[in-house]
Amino acid sequence: MERCGWCGEDPQYQHYHDTVWGRPEYDRTELFKKLCLDGQQAGLSWITILRKQVNYEAAFFNFNPEKMAAMTENDVLTQMQNAGIVRNKLKIQSLINNARALLAFEQAGGDFSEFLWSFVDHSPRDNAFRRLKDIPAETEQSKAMSKALKKLGFSFVGPTICYAFMQAVGMVNDHVVTCHVYQSCQRLSSH
């Protein structure tokens, strides 16, 4: 069974690749969680964050933005002692900050899923890359998403993080065409 080479031989990574990555996601909280986790990846490999995902979910109320927004500086200090997550104060603060930015956006009448999907005209894009090295690290759409999110007050949402997010939540299908998942993601994107 051929897979995209980035997931290697690690069973957890392969499971993520086969069942999550590239599949269109529209749920507001799931999108928020994935955007937050991708921000935690900055400077690290995704497998590092994937292995810590359950710890992040436990520490941050399964990414419930209402509960996260109520976290205080004492909560930040507590999480700095949590060996199950990346203990970077700026990254921990960004999770709380992003929850507050999301709620402010929604209180102003915004729909988070609708907003994010607008960067691909509300329809998943099927790319047809044959080699991993041909897949870009960022695109014009991810640059526009990054700029818009930063304007709303989000942090750790640079263009590369936004493109990784877009790939993960199926806004773009960047499985290589020889990957066994490519066609199933393509079928999902056509619905």
Image (cartoon, rainbow, N blue to C red):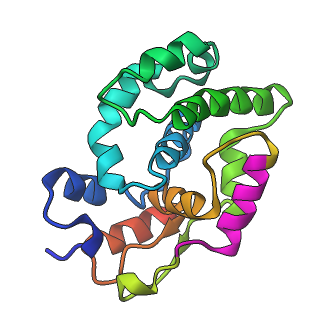
Against 38, is 158 above or below? below
Quarter of the image with the N terminus in it: bottom left
Along the viewing direction, whichever of 44 and 153 lies nearer the viewer: 44
Q: Residue furthest right?
A: 108
Against 9, is 175 above or below? below
Q: Position of residue 47 (x, y in %)?
A: 29, 52
How many labels were placed on the picture?
0
Q: Residue at point 73% right, 32% down?
A: 101
Against 59, is 187 above or below? below
Along the viewing direction, whichever of 122 and 2 lies nearer the viewer: 2
Q: Position of residue 59 (x, y in %)?
A: 41, 21
148 is within the stretch colored magenta: yes
183 is within the stretch colored magenta: no
Q: Residue at point 28% right, 83% down?
A: 178
Visible residue check, residue 55: yes
Q: Position of residue 41 (x, y in %)?
A: 44, 50
Against 105, is 11 above or below? below
Along the viewing direction, whichever of 13 and 108 lies nearer the viewer: 13
Along the viewing direction, whichever of 161 and 11 lies nearer the viewer: 161
* Left or right, residue 52 beside residue 22: left
Q: Which stretch is magenta?
A: 137-150
Q: Residue at point 39% right, 30% down?
A: 56
* Left or right, residue 96 beside residue 5: right
Q: Residue at point 25% right, 64% down?
A: 7
Visible residue check, residue 121: no
* Left or right, residue 14 beside residue 139: left
- Answer with the quarter of the image where residue 57 lies: top left
* Left or right, residue 122 beside residue 93: right
Considering the whole magenta stretch, tell me its main secondary structure.
Answer: helix
Q: Position of residue 148 (x, y in %)?
A: 78, 53
